[in-house]
Image (cartoon, rainbow, N blue to C red):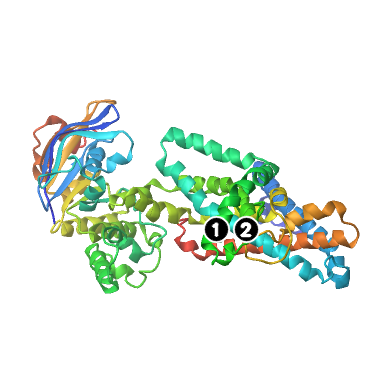
C-alpha cells in the first residue's frame, strides 16, 4: 500500500515485465508437448516394468543352490549354451541377410525399372507380414529335408572348416537351417529400412559422383552407400533384435540336443533362449519358471548391449554422416 | 587441356518434349563462355548435355552433333562415363561428399580413374588442386575433416578443386555462385579468371554483371512461351552482347527490360 503514495506506474503496469520472462506458449503447443512427453515417459515406464518383472522373478534362480537348477550345475552352466545358441543363430541370420537386403534395396532404388521396383517393394513388405510360425513350418517341413543333400556335400568338401565338420544331420534340422530361416524372416526389415535411406540420398551427391565420371556402381559406392551407412546399421540391428528374440520358427526348426558347438550342420545343436522358454514353459513349475525368466532377463540384457554397440558405431562417425 | 566445343544443329529432348532446339555454337578453347537467359530457357539443359549429365533423367536424348575437338560426344559406342571424365562440372549448390574428408573429396575423381596412386603423388595432387581452387591456405591444416564443415563458398571451391583434380578438358559451371554471398562470389570469379589459362569454361548464370565480368563470349537463350523449345538467340563477344547486340530480344534482356 505504501507504494501507492507516489504517482507512477501502477502495480498493474509493473507486473507484466516480471511475468513476461516466461516465454509465451500457445495452448496447442502445450498440448502437443505434453502428449509427446507423455508418450516418451510411457515407453520408459513400460520398459522399467518389464525389467522389474524380469529382475524380481529371476532372483530365486540366481540364489537357488546349483543342484536345484535344471541340469544340476547351476544357472550359468544352464544359460551359457542357450546364450551361445541364440547369438550363433542370430549371427548366421545377419551374415546372410544383410548383404542380400542391401543388394535388394539397391536394386529396388537404383536399378529396377519403376514398375518392377514398386511390385518388388510390395512383395518384400509382404514377407515381413508372414507370421513366424509359417516360416517355422516351412523351415522344418520343406527347407530342412531339402537341405540334407547340401549339408552332406558341405561335410564332404568343406569339412576342414569347423562350421561344416559334420557328421551331417539326416533330418536337416540344424543350426544352419535355423539361421537361414531367420535370415529370410529379417530380410524384409533390413531391406525396407535400407530402401528408405537409399531413396533419401540427395540427388546433388549422386550427380556429383556421376559428373566426376563414376559408373552407376561407383556412384552407389561414393554417394549412396556412405550416406545410407547408418540406416543399414539401424536396419541390421532391428533385424538382429528380431532374430535374437525369435521363438516359434527356431523352436520348430531346430533339433536340440547338446551344448556349445560351432558345427552348424550336425544333430547336436544348442537351443536359443527364446525357443527354450517357449518349449519348456508349459511344463515348468516352481523354480523352473524362475530359471526360464532369468534366461529371459539375460536375453533382455544381450539385446540392450547389441543396440548400445550399434548406437556407438553410428555415433562414432557422426561428423561425416552428412546430417550437417 | 582446354578443348573446343562445337554444337551443330543440336536438339535436346526429354522423351517427346523438345526442350532445346537448333543450337549452333562454337566455343573456343581456353575461353570463358557465359550462357544467359530467363528461367526455363534451356541454358542449363544445354550445359548439361555437353557432358551428358542430362541423361540422368530417363528419356533424355539429343539430335544433331556435339563435338569436343572434333570428337563426336554422342557417337555410337561413346560412353557417357568417359565423356564426364573429360568434361568436369560444378553445380548450383556446393555438393562435396559429406561422408568424405576434404582430402578424399579432392581425389574422389582420381580414385575412379586410376585405383593405385602412391601416397606422395596423391598428396601432391591434393595440394595442386586445392591451390588451383584458391583453397589450400584455408584448409591445409584440416584436410582430414569433413568437407561439409566448410562455409558455402569454401565448399564450392572444394567442388572446383575436385573437378580440376582429374584434369578435364572443359569445366562446366551451372550457376556456381547463386547460393553464395558476394565475397565468396568474388573469390569464385577470380578463380574462373585464373582457370581459363588451362581450361575451357562454360558458365550458366542469372547474374548479368557476373557474365559481363567473367566471360569472353556470351550466348543468350530465350523461349517464346511455355511448352515451346528454348533457342540460342545470339552469341558473340561479351562486349558486343552487352553494348550492341544484333537482336532486339537480347538488348531487351541485357538492359533489364524483361526477364
Q: Name the spot of residue A264 as percent of width and height, x first.
A: 62, 60
Residue at mark 2: chain:
A
Numbered label attached to residue A249: none
Q: Residue furthest right?
A: A286
Residue A173 image offset from top left, x and y in percent: 67, 52
- Which quadrant would the N terminus of chain B be assigned to in this image? bottom left
Where on the picture, by quarter, is residue A115? top left
Mark 1, secondary structure of its residue: helix
Q: x%, y% of residue A48?
A: 77, 58
Horizontally, residue A226 falls left or right of residue A152, namely: left
Q: Earlier in the sequence, mark 2 or mark 1?
A: 1
C-beta proximity under 8 Å, tags 2 and 1: yes
Question: In front: B150, or A264?
Answer: A264
Asked if marks 2 and 1 fall on the same chain, the answer is yes
Q: Is residue A73 left or right of residue B55?
A: right
- Badge 2 marks a residue whose secondary structure is loop
Q: Position of residue A176 (x, y in %)?
A: 61, 56
Residue A70 falls in image quadrant: bottom right
On the question of residue B168 being in view, the answer is yes
Q: Quadrant of the C terminus of chain B?
A: top left
Q: Which residue is mark 2?
A: A168
Q: Chain of mark 1?
A: A
As drawn, A127 above or below B103: above
Q: Which residue is mark 1?
A: A154
In the depicted structure, whether residue A83 falls above or below residue B95: below
Is residue A22 visible in the rendered structure shown here?
Answer: no
Categorize mark 1 by other alpha carbons within 10 Å: few (<14), some (14-19), many (20+): some
Amino acid at each position: 500500500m505504501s507504494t501507492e503514495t507516489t504517482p507512477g506506474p501502477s502495480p498493474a503496469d509493473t507486473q507484466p515485465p516480471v511475468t513476461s520472462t516466461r516465454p509465451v506458449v500457445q495452448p496447442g503447443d502445450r498440448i502437443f508437448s505434453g502428449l509427446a512427453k507423455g508418450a516418451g515417459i510411457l515407453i520408459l515406464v513400460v520398459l522399467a516394468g518389464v525389467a522389474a518383472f524380469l529382475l524380481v522373478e529371476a532372483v530365486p534362480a540366481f540364489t537357488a543352490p546349483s543342484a536345484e537348477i535344471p541340469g544340476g550345475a547351476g544357472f550359468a552352466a544352464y544359460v551359457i549354451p542357450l546364450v551361445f545358441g541364440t547369438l550363433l543363430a542370430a549371427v548366421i541370420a545377419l551374415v546372410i541377410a544383410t548383404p542380400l537386403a542391401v543388394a535388394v534395396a539397391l536394386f529396388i532404388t537404383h536399378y529396377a525399372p519403376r514398375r518392377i521396383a514398386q511390385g518388388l517393394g510390395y512383395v518384400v513388405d509382404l514377407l515381413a507380414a508372414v507370421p513366424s510360425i509359417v516360416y517355422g513350418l516351412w523351415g522344418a517341413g520343406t527347407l530342412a529335408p531339402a537341405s540334407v543333400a547340401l549339408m552332406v556335400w558341405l561335410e564332404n568338401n568343406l569339412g576342414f572348416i569347423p562350421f561344416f565338420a559334420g557328421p551331417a544331420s539326416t533330418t536337416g534340422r540344424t543350426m544352419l537351417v535355423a539361421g537361414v530361416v531367420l535370415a529370410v524372416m529379417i530380410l524384409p526389415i533390413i531391406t525396407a529400412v535400407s530402401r528408405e535411406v537409399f531413396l533419401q540420398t540427395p540427388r546433388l551427391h549422386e550427380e556429383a559422383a556421376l559428373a566426376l565420371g563414376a559408373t552407376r556402381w561407383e556412384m552407389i559406392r561414393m554417394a549412396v552407400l556412405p550416406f545410407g551407412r547408418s540406416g543399414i546399421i539401424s536396419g541390421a540391428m532391428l533385424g538382429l533384435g528380431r532374430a535374437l528374440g525369435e521363438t516359434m520358427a527356431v523352436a520348430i526348426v531346430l533339433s536340440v540336443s547338446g551344448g556349445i558347438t560351432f558345427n552348424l550342420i550336425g544333430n547336436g545343436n544348442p537351443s536359443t533362449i527364446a525357443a527354450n522358454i517357449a518349449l519348456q514353459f508349459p511344463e515348468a513349475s516352481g523354480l523352473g519358471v524362475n530359471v526360464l525368466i532369468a534366461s529371459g532377463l539375460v536375453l533382455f540384457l544381450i539385446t540392450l548391449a547389441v543396440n548400445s554397440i550399434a548406437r556407438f558405431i553410428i555415433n562414432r562417425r557422426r561428423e561425416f554422416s552428412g546430417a550437417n | 587441356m582446354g578443348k573446343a566445343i562445337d554444337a551443330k544443329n543440336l536438339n535436346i529432348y526429354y522423351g517427346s518434349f523438345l526442350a532445346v532446339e537448333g543450337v549452333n555454337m562454337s566455343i573456343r578453347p581456353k575461353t570463358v563462355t557465359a550462357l544467359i537467359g530467363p528461367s526455363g530457357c534451356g541454358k542449363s539443359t544445354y550445359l548439361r548435355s555437353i557432358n551428358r549429365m542430362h541423361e540422368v533423367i530417363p528419356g533424355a536424348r539429343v539430335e544433331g552433333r556435339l563435338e569436343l575437338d572434333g570428337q563426336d560426344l554422342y557417337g555410337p559406342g561413346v560412353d557417357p562415363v568417359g565423356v564426364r571424365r573429360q568434361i568436369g562440372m560444378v553445380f548450383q549448390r556446393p555438393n562435396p561428399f559429406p561422408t568424405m574428408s576434404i582430402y578424399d573429396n579432392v581425389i574422389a575423381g582420381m580414385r575412379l580413374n586410376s585405383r593405385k596412386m602412391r601416397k606422395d603423388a596423391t598428396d601432391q595432387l591434393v595440394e595442386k588442386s586445392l591451390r588451383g581452387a584458391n583453397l589450400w591456405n584455408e584448409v591445409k591444416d584440416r584436410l582430414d575433416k569433413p568437407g561439409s564443415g566448410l562455409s558455402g563458398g569454401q565448399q564450392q571451391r572444394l567442388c572446383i578443386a575436385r573437378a580440376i583434380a582429374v584434369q578435364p578438358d572443359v569445366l562446366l559451371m551451372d550457376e556456381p555462385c547463386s547460393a553464395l554471398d558476394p565475397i565468396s562470389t568474388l573469390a569464385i570469379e577470380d578463380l574462373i579468371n585464373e582457370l581459363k589459362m588451362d581450361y575451357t569454361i562454360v558458365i550458366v548464370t542469372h547474374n548479368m554483371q557476373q557474365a559481363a565480368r567473367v566471360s569472353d563470349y556470351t550466348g543468350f537463350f530465350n523461349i517464346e512461351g511455355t511448352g515451346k523449345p528454348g533457342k540460342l538467340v545470339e552469341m558473340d563477344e561479351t562486349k558486343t552482347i552487352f553494348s550492341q547486340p544484333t537482336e532486339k530480344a537480347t538488348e531487351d534482356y541485357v538492359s533489364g527490360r524483361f526477364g
